[in-house]
Image (cartoon, coloured by chain):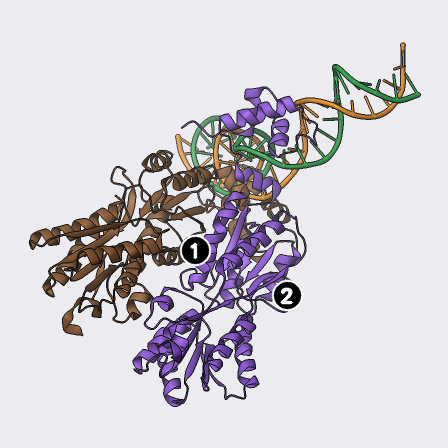
Chain colours: A brown, B purple, C orange, D green
Amino acid sequence: MSKKLSIRDIGKELGISITTVSFILNGKAKEKRISEALTEKVLKFVEEVNFKPNMMAQGLRTGKSKIICLMVEDISNNLLFAQVARLIEEEAHNKGYRIIYCSTDNKKEKAIELIRLFRDRSIDGYIITPPEGIEKEIQSLLDEGIPVVLIDRNLPLLDCNHVVIENLNSTYQAIIHLIENGFKNIAFVTLDSDQMQMADRLGGYQKAIAEHNLKPYVKKVGFHDAGEQNVNEIASFLKENKNIDAIFFSTNYIGVWGLQAIKSLNLRIPNDIAVISFDDQDLFKFYTPSITVVAQPVPEISSHIIRLMLNALEEKDTQIHEIVLPAKLIIRESSSLLNT
Amino acid sequence: MSKKLSIRDIGKELGISITTVSFILNGKAKEKRISEALTEKVLKFVEEVNFKPNMMAQGLRTGKSKIICLMVEDISNNLLFAQVARLIEEEAHNKGYRIIYCSTDNKKEKAIELIRLFRDRSIDGYIITPPEGIEKEIQSLLDEGIPVVLIDRNLPLLDCNHVVIENLNSTYQAIIHLIENGFKNIAFVTLDSDQMQMADRLGGYQKAIAEHNLKPYVKKVGFHDAGEQNVNEIASFLKENKNIDAIFFSTNYIGVWGLQAIKSLNLRIPNDIAVISFDDQDLFKFYTPSITVVAQPVPEISSHIIRLMLNALEEKDTQIHEIVLPAKLIIRESSSLLNT
DNA sequence: ATATTTCGCTAAATCGATTTAGCAATTTTC
DNA sequence: GAAAATTGCTAAATCGATTTAGCGAAATAT
């Protein structure tokens, strides 16, 4: 291949100034009163030689990198994040943006470090699943006018774009579903965390339980470095509360641990214990019996995320948007005795 | 926050030239005979004010973006890719590199388009799961001296770094395991594709079958846009070949389809049909019965990938490396009648 | 004591774009 | 027909780094 072209080469070749070329390429031909004839000539030539402006030079001059940072809990752990990554990718590319990713492991320190790392590198926008306690860092991004979209959970202290689901209500509906199917001693297993989305799911559970004068059974487990230990903890919890006849797992990986715990105790689903988990995945679909889930509308979530981000980047929309999407209860075999 | 510092500000503040600052920051103090006293003073000051050089300016001048492109089949589909993404992330960051990702859907045209898109934007290196037919594009990257590491599969026409697993031998071993457990009519379900890794897996199957004078049963299905159709095709295949007593699925998603097909026919695993799948995942671990798999050593794969890439980028190592790692047969309940 | 080398540092060019300020030529206004 | 406005374009500064070529002072050689 030949050496890379610059805007200077284009100007030289056509016998015009680089200023003119730049104006035309940036769609300012009209505004800058460049004749239509010349405009077309330049565009045609640029197309012909397949000229692409150097991003570094553009970035240096404009201060924009055309890069969006996708900061998730763990790109490999919760399928949700990889799916979002996949779904926002194409639209970003279409608008000339690239996406870098990084994983926080849901740790405050790591998230702060990553934000600091990237903000020195002129990232244009951030899509973040925020751990608790990074409000200050995010606020300072916002103060600089850098678009931020929080996803999966919100930071209530912050006035920031976010895309979340109806955690409280969808959990409430799921518990109601269990209650309507005759279950009385319904447990709720969640993370030991104050994250917004978790608090809301717990809230939905508590609301349903309180409304029906049932006894709450809440078990909190640690974060997911400790899979095996969490399986044991859930098993112990079930052994200590033998009257539990239904159980709700507040995330997909807790659901996986829970199924292991139930298997280890030789309990039958749903006869001995009914099961619902948050988040859908192959394992739940094809488990025997299949597991009822609260499924997040991943495509809708993703399209909202990227739309919010691109609109903010292109300054089409400077308002703050708080998007709350409904989740869907997908009823399978694990949550009703009638089905088996 | 205060405005962003530049190397010029540093120089002004300390009363020295920006040249000196640049030399020191680039570790060329010794080489350029800057006194130790000044070197330390500058480093201390830079640390104090937390100065970070502007990547755009550096990139413009040096032609390096400090960005690696991770081009996979589909970041959300095969967990393998998301895991690799996760595992290479940290080491790349440590060395000052960021990672952008994109998905080819295993389509030649899309891969070519993406490479063209990114090469105009000075990406320093590419980690690619190549679809067939993009040899020319990759060769032209190589010709420009841009490091490329192929992963998951190789392009045999190319002299290029790659990290793959022993597809042929590991499949061979898995089939031998079935044979040793007394299965005689062993089927192999794979993609309708000539990709290297698939060809090798088929080769391993054929070798084992031929060595034991067994009858081969090979079924090829389409790519994974058509999940339901593929389930049906596998089911039909099994109905047409009722004497099949064991089946090997050559990727994880084919494995998932296969399990659905087997379930739809009400066949019991392993009594009616033994099962082994390539690639491990939760579904196989926790399925009832648990599924024997050929598991890829994802951490080893990932560390080789990023090491090859970083060494090539830092020009520590200009040799081409062809890394072939062993995979591991994880024997579970689905592949032996003795276990049940 | 002078010529040469070494030391310690810097001025200025450069990468490739954007953008401000402004220049001739032409057209309009009165 | 002269002044004013518009048209169509460009020169040059700028973003913030790297890097080449080189300068004056001090150290060493002769």
In the rendered image, the quadrant that contains the C terminus of chain B is bottom left
Q: Nearer the viewer, residue A199 or B73?
A: A199
Q: Is residue A282 left or right of residue B90?
A: left
Q: Chain of mark 2?
A: B
- What secondary structure is marked by label 1? helix
Q: What residue appears at the point 62 percent right and 69 percent down from the top-left corner?
A: B156
Residue B226 pos. (x, y %): 38, 74
Q: Amino acid at mark 2?
A: Leu
- Give the number of the mark in front: 2 or 1: 2
Q: Is residue B124 above or below residue B332?
A: above
Picture layout, residue A237 above or below residue B284: above
Find residue A203 and report its horizontal and vertical position in percent: 17, 49
Q: Are marks 2 and 1 in contact (CB under 8 Å)?
A: no
Q: Residues within 10 Å of mark 1 (few under 14, many from 20)?
A: few
The quadrant of the image that shows the N terminus of chain B is top left
Nearest to the observer: residue A53 or residue A294: A294
Residue B227 placement (x, y as % from top left): 36, 73
- The residue indicated by pointer 2 is B158
Identified at 25% across, 37% down, the residue is A157
Answer with the quarter of the image where residue B187 lies.
bottom left
- Residue at 62% of width from left, 25% of height from top? B39
Residue A180 in view of the camera: yes
Three-letter amino acid code of the residue under disc 1: Asn
Q: Tell me if residue B242 comes above or below residue B194 in the rendering.
A: below
Residue indicated by mark 1: A94
Residue A332 is at least partly visible in this image: no
